[in-house]
Image: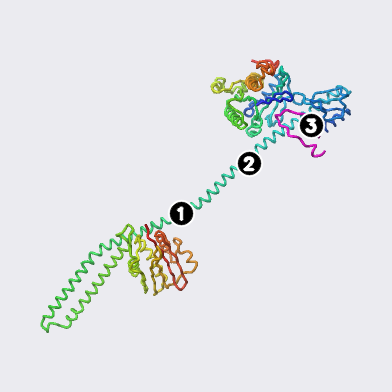
Amino acid sequence: MAEWNEQNNTCLVKLVFYGPALSGKTTNLISLHNLLQPDMKGEMQILETQNDRTLFFDLLPLGVTTPSGALIKIKMYTVPGQVAHDSTRKALLSRADGVVFVADSQINQSENNAESFKNLAENAAKVGLNFEKMPLVIQFNKRDLSNIVSEDELHQRWSKTPWPLHYASALNNEGVLETFEGLLNLVYKDLDEEFSLKTEHQLDQTQFIQQVIGGAHHDG
Amino acid sequence: MTDEQFHMSPIEFDSDLVLQDILSKRLMLQIEQVIKQFGIEQYLLITLKQEPIAGDLATENIKHRLPLAPELEPIGYLCFGEEDLVLVKGIHRFVTMMVQSEWRYHMASDMHLKAIKADYEALKEKHELLLESEKKYRELSASLEVKVKEQVQTIEEAQRKLYETEKLASVGQLAAGVAHEVNNPIGFIYSNLKSAKEYIGEINDWFNTLPHEYQTQNVKDLLEDFPFLLDESQTGAERVRRIVADLKAYSDIDYTEQHKVNIKEVVERVVRIFNTQHNKSIKVALDAPEDLHLMCHSGFINQLLLNILSNAANAIEQSGTININASSKGDAISIDISDDGCGMTEEVLKRVFEPFYTTHDVGKGTGLGLTVARDIARNHGGDIELFSVPEKGTKVAILLRDSN
């Protein structure tokens, strides 16, 4: 859960982009870095890669100030998708306030998606997160490719789950903001419950999202 | 630089960044070197709360106050006096990048350490499990060996028992057959001989009434000799009947259940059968009380005794003596059988109870005699012990108890 540092009046929120290897987690973050215009936006930190694959994590920090003068700092991380980096994934997932699960839409990736989702559930339990209740949105990325599972089929598969489904083409900045907005809606509710954002900090849900996204242009 | 200057306080990759945490002495030194390289002598690095950390610029001389924000929000300020704005901005950008790179390094190393530690813990856990399962398998394999040995022993014993039981059964069948076939003819041979003896008496009486000139010496001799012949034949027939009866008793054909037997009678019977089996001059002396009884399968006890006696006969070259002493010993019965035969060496003695161990040529002995004898003794709550001196003889001590 997010922490509120009373000393510098800052709330630290941790969001994690989870998913199988090469599903486009880093691309999502780069896209968000391009699209978002929050009050404060840090430089995107791509820590270490090997052949385009994340070894440690990527980090995009951004911040919004509440009318009450507090700073809500949102740190967004991507996990390394490769199976071997499970310990790193676990460390990144620890104390997460929300998760975007970035799945690969390609037909031949269904198994990897399932495997990774299962891994997310397991690791969430291991680091003490309530998987059923934590803010989680599902994004099926790479909708621009041709050999992909249809939206109908995906909808059918996921409609019985409690998690909102989003479609994206992160490479083309499509669907990324919607996914992120979906997650922010869930995260706000948790934060409001914990820190009374609306009553004590005069920051309601619409305002919060508007401030995080800023003047970003909505596609589609 | 000293070790201390390389020291870094642990910074978690996802914690809030504090200037003091990230500024190691090494980094501060490097920052100062960079600033001086650009020709600026005095600077001041302060925290958000205006506390000076590095540099010696006096607070009142600060002209440029540039926020240091490697991540998002400022975590401190870099301050300069009256300097060129472009130069100051360049230095500020450079220092920000230095701090940023230090921060990234901290994040990566923290993550790396976390992952390594978790992997190591997982590996350790796996190792423990592996050790545990290895231990389990080792125990299992050790006990398996013992179990297999036990099983093999049980099977061997069962096989021997089966072998002996079958042998006994076939001997019993044979004895029953012989008894049936021999008893009848022996019966009428015996009674006919009796009648013949009476007839001879009558013939003799009639002969004596004949006139003297008819009573030739020749016929007289014949009539005198005839009863002796018949007596001898009767004795012979009696012996045959006795042997058949012994054989029947020996093979225990009439008893499938345990029953109470008189030890002296049993030993005597076995000795009679034993005497028909060897062609040496062996004197058997038996010393046993009349009232020694044992609850047992007499067929097996017969076999036990005959096996021991056969061994004794084998040990005796041409002539010798076998002493049998039976007595009660607490709740058990002890039967000692000693011979004055060739005896056994220590090595042979050690192996006599091994199944199929034999000192005879192939085909002469099964090598099971003593093994079976011991099985029988143990089944009757007892055991067998051997004492032997080469060239002096062997003593076999048998202990038996009532079986229930």
Does B337 sit left or right of B91 as displayed? Answer: left
Of the two numbered discs 2 and 3 on the same chain, state the one appearing first in sequence.
3
Furthest-bottom residue in this view: B213
Q: Mark 3 lies on which chain?
A: B
Expressed as whole percent of the image width and height from the top left, the position of residue B207 reads 13, 79
Q: How crowded is mark 2: few (under 14 residues within 10 Å), some or many (20 or more)?
A: few
Foreground of the two, B183 or B264: B264
The amino acid at mark 3 is: Leu
Residue, disc 3: B23
Front one among A90 and A97: A97
Q: Tell me the amino acid under the disc marked 1.
A: Val
Q: In which quarter of the image is residue A66?
A: top right
User: Is-magenta flag for residue B20?
Assistant: yes
Circle nearer the N terminus (1, 3): 3
Q: Residues within 10 Å of mark 1 (few under 14, many from 20)?
A: few
Q: How far apart are marks 1 and 2 (CA)?
A: 41 Å
> On the image, numbered disc 1 is attached to which residue?
B152
Mark 3 element type: loop
Q: Does residue B357 belong to the magenta stretch?
A: no
